[in-house]
């Protein structure tokens, strides 16, 4: 089962690595730069349009019933994570420009797809996971830019939200998202029927933004500014960050008296950070030459969270079978 879960994401992992290598060796130059910028902006808008189209109003209404889980998950995502991020970046660890990226990843919303998938494998409350992850992404459109403005002033060239940045947020994030959501009654069935096909559109848009971002960073000397030691330290800090959040969410769930199924939701929805939302948000919130540096820690954390949560989901599933005597599901 673990191999199968990780295998679901392996093509994206390989594609991410390949895109970074391509951008490092063959970044856009000259007349192609504004063309790629235009494609990247269109990719960001398309991503958030699809996010809006996928969010059902039924999920929003149902989510209000399990408020204890959702508030705990949102508090972890937008309060506990940023506190850890501030603590980590306050320590002089020689991260250089990667420190801003480490802080940025702690300000992002949770994932949707993997949070729900791992909750299902762990035999948790899947309906609550859908609601919690959807709420996180919806609020993240507003809260992440606000947190960036409050906590990252001066970091990675970010000096707060200017009128130009605010305009980009509205045009590239909010307008496409609400347009997709308003059109859901018309296109919702199409989106549901072609979910697999549209996932390639999602991933293609992410890879396009990553290529453009890393290409701009490479032109500004990305790999001369980031040392292998700094990358290793970031990876270790990402492992520590995930471990602390997983421990905190488990303790929080026990204090709140959550049922096992809801504790699973809190752990998986509260401990994740969204690459799908983080990459386009970084493209809007930061100067083009800084985006590659900002999203590098997020890409590292993304791979670590998938591997760790795959093992954790299997452990929860085994505990459920041992406790309740449920028949094992097919894992071939």
Image (cartoon, rainbow, N blue to C red):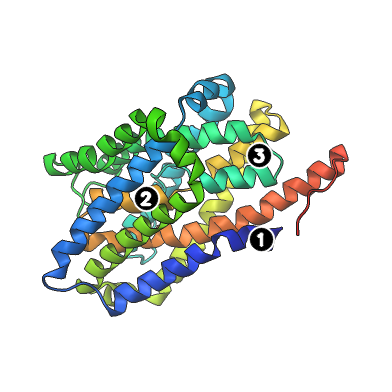
Residue lying furthest right: 325
Which sits earlier in the primary sequence, circle 1 or circle 3?
1
Residue situated in front as seen by the camera: 8 or 124: 8
Residue 233 shows in the view: yes
Q: Pick the quarter of the image with the N terminus.
A: bottom right
Q: Position of residue 22 (x, y in %)?
A: 33, 75
Q: Residues within 10 Å of mark 2 (few under 14, many from 20)?
A: many
Q: Is residue 313 left or right of residue 41?
A: right
Q: Pick the quarter of the image with the C terminus.
A: bottom right
Q: Quadrant of residue 230?
A: bottom left
Identified at 38% across, 36% down, the residue is 52
- For the residues bearing labels 1 and 3, Cβ distance under 8 angstroms: no
Identified at 61% across, 37% down, the residue is 265
Circle 2 SS class: helix
Identify the residue position indicated by label 2 in the image. 278
Identified at 51% across, 65% down, the residue is 11
Looking at the rendered image, the disc whose residue lies closer to the viewer, 1 or 3, is 1
Q: CA distance from mark 1 to mark 2?
A: 25 Å
Which numbered dot is residue 4?
1
Q: CA distance from mark 3 to mark 2?
A: 24 Å
Circle 3 SS class: helix
Which numbered dot is residue 264?
3
Q: Position of residue 143 (x, y in %)?
A: 34, 35
Circle 1 SS class: helix
Q: Is residue 247 left or right of residue 42?
A: right
Residue 79 shows in the view: no
Q: Residues within 10 Å of mark 1 (few under 14, many from 20)?
A: few
């Amino acid at each position: 089962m673990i191999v199968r879960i990780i295998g679901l994401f392996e093509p994206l992992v390989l594609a991410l690595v390949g895109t970074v290598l391509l951008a490092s060796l063959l970044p856009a130059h000259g007349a192609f730069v504004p063309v790629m910028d235009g494609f990247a902006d269109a990719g960001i808008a398309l991503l958030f349009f699809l996010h809006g189209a996928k969010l059902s109003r039924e999920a929003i209404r149902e989510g209000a019933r399990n408020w204890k889980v959702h508030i705990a998950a949102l508090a972890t995502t937008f309060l506990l994570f940023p506190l850890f991020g501030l603590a980590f970046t306050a320590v002089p660890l020689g991260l250089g420009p990667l420190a801003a990226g480490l802080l940025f990843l702690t300000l992002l919303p949770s994932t949707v797809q993997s949070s729900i998938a791992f909750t299902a494998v762990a035999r948790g409350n899947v309906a609550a996971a859908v609601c919690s992850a959807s709420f996180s992404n919806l609020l993240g459109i507003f809260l992440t830019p606000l947190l960036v403005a409050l906590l990252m002033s001066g970091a990675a060239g970010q000096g707060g939200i200017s009128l130009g940045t605010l305009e980009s947020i509205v045009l590239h994030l909010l307008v496409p998202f609400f347009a997709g959501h308003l059109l859901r009654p018309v296109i919702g069935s199409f989106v549901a029927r072609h979910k697999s096909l549209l996932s390639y559109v999602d991933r293609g848009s992410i890879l396009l933004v990553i290529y453009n971002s890393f290409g701009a960073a490479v032109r500004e000397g990305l790999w001369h500014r980031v040392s292998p030691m700094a990358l290793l330290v970031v990876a270790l800090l990402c492992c520590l960050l995930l471990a602390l959040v997983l421990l905190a969410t488990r303790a929080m769930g026990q204090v709140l008296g959550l049922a096992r199924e809801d504790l699973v939701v809190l752990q998986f929805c509260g401990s994740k950070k969204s690459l799908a939302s983080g990459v386009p948000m970084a493209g809007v919130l930061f100067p083009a030459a800084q985006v590659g540096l900002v999203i590098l820690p997020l890409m590292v954390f993304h791979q670590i969270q998938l591997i760790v949560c795959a093992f954790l989901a299997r452990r929860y599933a085994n505990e459920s079978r041992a406790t309740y005597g449920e028949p094992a599901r097919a894992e071939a």
